[in-house]
Image: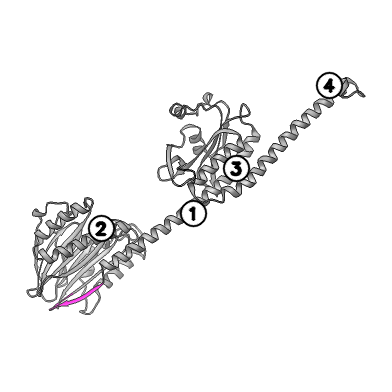
């Protein structure tokens, strides 16, 4: 080892030692600068990496791996904010590719260090967490992991709170420094941008999935619900179903039972998307098959239908079905109403709601009441699903059955499209906001 005089023989001892210390400080400062340059270089490279994937599982894994490497810590976590529950949720990727996420735990704002950061939207570093009243040791007790120091920051994107990122236990020093916080905040800004991009992408995928499902449901609906405009003797029957964005389980059907009898059905499963369309298809198909066997026997047909769907579908507590048989030789209609369908008789421009029926197909079929209506010249018999009743205006008020019945009391010319007129009336009431549920209608007009 060089002694002071051997290291700098031409200067005094005090000057020599001062020079040595300066050189040591310079080496230390240079090491710090080099370390900062390395970290900044990593940040630049990592910025491209974390923005190269839009898969949320892979992204979260990459962010946690990266922050652990940059901050030189034992572990890192990223908790996403779930607005509908007001929770911070920690999820980890399944498999190396990060496909799919599994939830590990969730916390509320204000709970623990991460919860405090979420609540205050302020970053914090703590080098002795067990001495800090904000620290929640429950996670350590559950996992066996010993937390010593934490650095934690909120994730923001254009003022929107996305979650919290934290790094735990530095491995090459006793605690976090101000320089660590600066570096951590730079990375958290990059992570927030990447997370927001992934959220946008996920939302776009979900929107595309919904569009695809709705398109498939629309095809099913169009098959189940062709527009009808038929005439049997002196009775004209029109039928139409209009699909909404949120629901896909409504249908209408007519079945010719023999030369004088027509089966009429109006149903709804109140179920969304493709499942609603498929279940409606099953129900409509079963109904059509049974109509060939028991079409005129209303109670018998309903019992058989309930038996069939009970073996092939989930319990249909929300299913609605009005089934009737029209004897057009006698202008007489008999029907059973199971669920939420609205039969309205309009006679001499006065609407009467024939309020008879059970709430769903889950009820005891044998106790259901058969309603018989003798139709007279000039009568109009209208079957409505509840979708039109529930249409809302800008004030949040429903159209309601009373307004629909009042509208039906108008003196419609024989050639007028009553369904079209009623839908225009509903459209004007809602202010053009569109349908929230399917609307199905069948109208019988007696000349």
Secondary element under disc 2, as helix, strand or loop, is helix
Q: Earlier in the sequence, mark 1 or mark 4?
A: 4
- How far is disc 1 from disc 3 in space, using C-alphas? 21 Å
Residue at mark 3? 187
Q: Residues within 10 Å of mark 1 (few under 14, many from 20)?
A: some
Residue at the farthest right position: 10
- How far is disc 1 from disc 2 in space, using C-alphas? 31 Å
Q: Nearer the viewer, mark 3 or mark 4?
A: 4
What residue is drawn where x is 83% and y is 21%?
2
Left or right? Give the position of 419 relative to 145: left
User: Looking at this view, is 26 or 336 the one in front?
Assistant: 26
Secondary element under disc 4, as helix, strand or loop, is loop
- How far is disc 3 from disc 4 in space, using C-alphas? 44 Å
Q: Earlier in the sequence, mark 3 or mark 4?
A: 4
- How far is disc 3 from disc 2 in space, using C-alphas? 50 Å
Residue at mark 1? 201
Residue at mark 2? 279
Q: Is residue 229 above or below residue 179?
A: below
């Amino acid at each position: 080892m060089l002694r002071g005089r051997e290291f700098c023989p031409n200067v005094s001892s005090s000057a020599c030692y001062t020079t040595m210390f300066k050189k040591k400080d310079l080496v230390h400062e240079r090491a710090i600068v080099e370390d900062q340059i390395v970290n900044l270089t990593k940040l630049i490279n990592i910025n491209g990496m974390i923005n190269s994937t839009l898969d949320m599982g892979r992204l979260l894994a990459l962010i946690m791996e990266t922050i652990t490497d940059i901050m030189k810590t034992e572990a890192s976590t990223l908790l996403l904010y779930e607005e509908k529950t007001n929770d911070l949720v920690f999820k980890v990727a399944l498999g190396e590719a990060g496909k799919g996420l599994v939830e590990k735990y969730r916390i509320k704002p204000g709970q623990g260090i991460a919860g405090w950061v979420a609540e205050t939207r302020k970053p914090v570093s703590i080098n002795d967490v067990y001495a800090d009243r904000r620290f929640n040791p429950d996670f350590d007790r559950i996992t066996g992991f010993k937390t010593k120091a934490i650095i934690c920051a909120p994730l923001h994107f254009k003022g929107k709170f996305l979650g919290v990122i934290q790094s735990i236990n530095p491995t090459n020093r006793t605690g976090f420094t101000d320089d660590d916080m600066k570096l951590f905040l730079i990375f958290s800004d990059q992570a927030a941008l990447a997370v927001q991009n992934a959220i946008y992408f996920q939302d776009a995928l979900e929107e595309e999935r919904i569009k695809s499902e709705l398109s498939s449901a629309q095809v099913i609906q169009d098959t189940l619900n062709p527009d009808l405009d038929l005439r049997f003797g002196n009775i004209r029957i029109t039928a139409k179903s209009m699909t909404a964005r949120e629901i896909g389980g409504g249908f209408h059907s007519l079945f010719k039972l023999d030369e004088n009898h027509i089966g009429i059905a109006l149903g709804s499963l109140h179920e969304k998307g493709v499942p609603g369309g498929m279940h409606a298809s099953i129900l409509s198909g079963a109904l059509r098959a049974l109509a060939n066997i028991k079409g005129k026997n209303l109670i018998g047909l309903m019992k058989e239908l309930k038996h069939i769907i009970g073996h092939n579908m989930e319990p249909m507590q929300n299913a609605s079905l009005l089934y009737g048989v029209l004897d057009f030789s006698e202008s007489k209609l008999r029907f059973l109403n199971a669920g939420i369908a609205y039969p309205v008789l309009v006679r001499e421009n006065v609407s009467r709601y024939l309020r008879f029926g059970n709430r769903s197909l889950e009820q005891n079929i044998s106790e259901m009441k058969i309603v018989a209506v003798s139709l007279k010249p000039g009568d109009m018999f209208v079957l409505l699903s509840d979708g039109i009743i529930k249409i809302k205006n800008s004030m949040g008020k429903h159209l309601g059955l009373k307004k629909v019945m009042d509208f039906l009391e108008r003196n419609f010319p024989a050639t007028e499209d009553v369904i079209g007129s009623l839908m225009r009336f509903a459209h004007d009431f809602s202010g053009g906001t569109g349908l929230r549920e399917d609307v199905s209608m069948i109208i019988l007009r007696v000349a």
